[in-house]
Image (tube, rainbow, N blue to C red):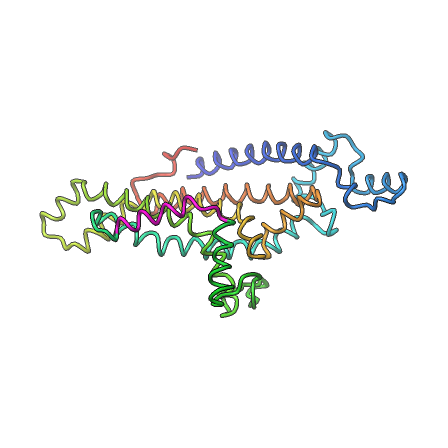
Amino acid sequence: MSVYLIRRLLQASMVVFFMSAIVFSGIYIIGDPVDLLVSNEASPEELARATKALGLNKPFHEQYFVFLKNALRGDLGRSFVFGVSAVTLIIERMPATLELAVVGMIMALVIGIPLGMYAGLKPHKLSSRGIMAGSIFGFSLPHFWQGMMMILIFSVMLGWLPSSGRGDTVTVFGIQWSFLTWDGLRHILLPALNMALFKMSLIIRLTRAGVREAMLQDYVKFARAKGVSGMRIIWVHVFKNILIPIITVSGLEFGHMVAFAVVTETVFSWPGMGRLIIQSIEMLDRPVVVAYLMITVLFIIIVNLVVDVLYSIVDPRVRLQNLKG
């Protein structure tokens, strides 16, 4: 266990290092933030002072080494626009994005697994074929178009749900949560469903394939021969054996939901990290962009590690020492 964790931590450190170099290089060549932050009427002396104050007067390699030195102390820089720590700015927005991703993933699992199991157990029924045909739309439709159609139907035409914002929130342990209030829950349903549709389709098809394969295995045939009830076969023998691929995909997709919530948060004006990164890119706010991507990479690495640990809990035959890095 300890050897596995050490190996994963070393791999994570290398990934974060190379990612920081790529991101810092990319944001460096995009443009000069001073051109956006300082008035067009500013004198050359004022431009020079602003450039020096932001630390942009140094060569690229010196800026990067300063960034690395500060990053080792947990300081990823101060926002050029807001004038506060970039990490603090992102952490303030993180609960909103995490809340949206968690609710979306719960929707995908709660709806996707039962539908996938039904389609796998009764593959020739018309309803099962309808489920599989419907899952194609989840893969095909762009997120921004789905979101706009949801707003048009459920907010504009029917007036059932609000189209933007986070609604009322409740502070728990110093963090604001919207799903704990009725108004906040109404606000989160549409954006969470928009994020969940693709994942739901993926889980439906993955679950169906796993069920179809498991039903043909010898252990299911032996269980039937011994007179085991159908429900026990489904939930003990079949469901437990299809959990590992579901856990794998769900863990990876949850990381992607957090990292790529930009479109959904923009369409529904959800005040999370996604909207922050769009604003930061528009203003060339380098520290916020780099800090966001670094935190996102670390989050995905942590999620992958948690998924590996869950392997050994779900299936005792799987040991962490045997898992590939």
Helix, strand or loop for the magenta stretch, by majority: helix
Which region is colored magenta? 128-143
Name the one closer to the observer, 175 or 104.
104
**Seen in the image, is 136 located left or right of residue 103?**
left
Residue 308 on image: x %, y %: 40, 42
Q: Farthest residue toward the front?
A: 157
Tell me what residue is drawn at x 37 percent, y 53 percent. 109
Q: Farthest residue toward the bottom?
A: 182
Residue 258 on image: x %, y %: 52, 48
Q: Can residue 229 be seen at all in this image of the molecule?
A: yes
Q: Is 36 a magenta residue?
A: no
Q: Can residue 75 be seen at all in this image of the molecule?
A: no
Name the one closer to the observer, 222 or 266.
266
The image quadrant where one finds the N terminus is top left
**Seen in the image, is 202 located left or right of residue 274?**
left
Tell me what residue is drawn at x 57 percent, y 53 percent. 94
From what the image shows, is residue 146 above or below residue 62?
below
How many circles with numbers are drawn on the protein? 0
**Seen in the image, is 55 located left or right of residue 13?**
right
Tell me what residue is drawn at x 44 percent, y 45 percent. 253
Residue 249 on image: x %, y %: 39, 43
Residue 277 on image: x %, y %: 62, 47
**Seen in the image, is 155 located left or right of residue 58?**
left
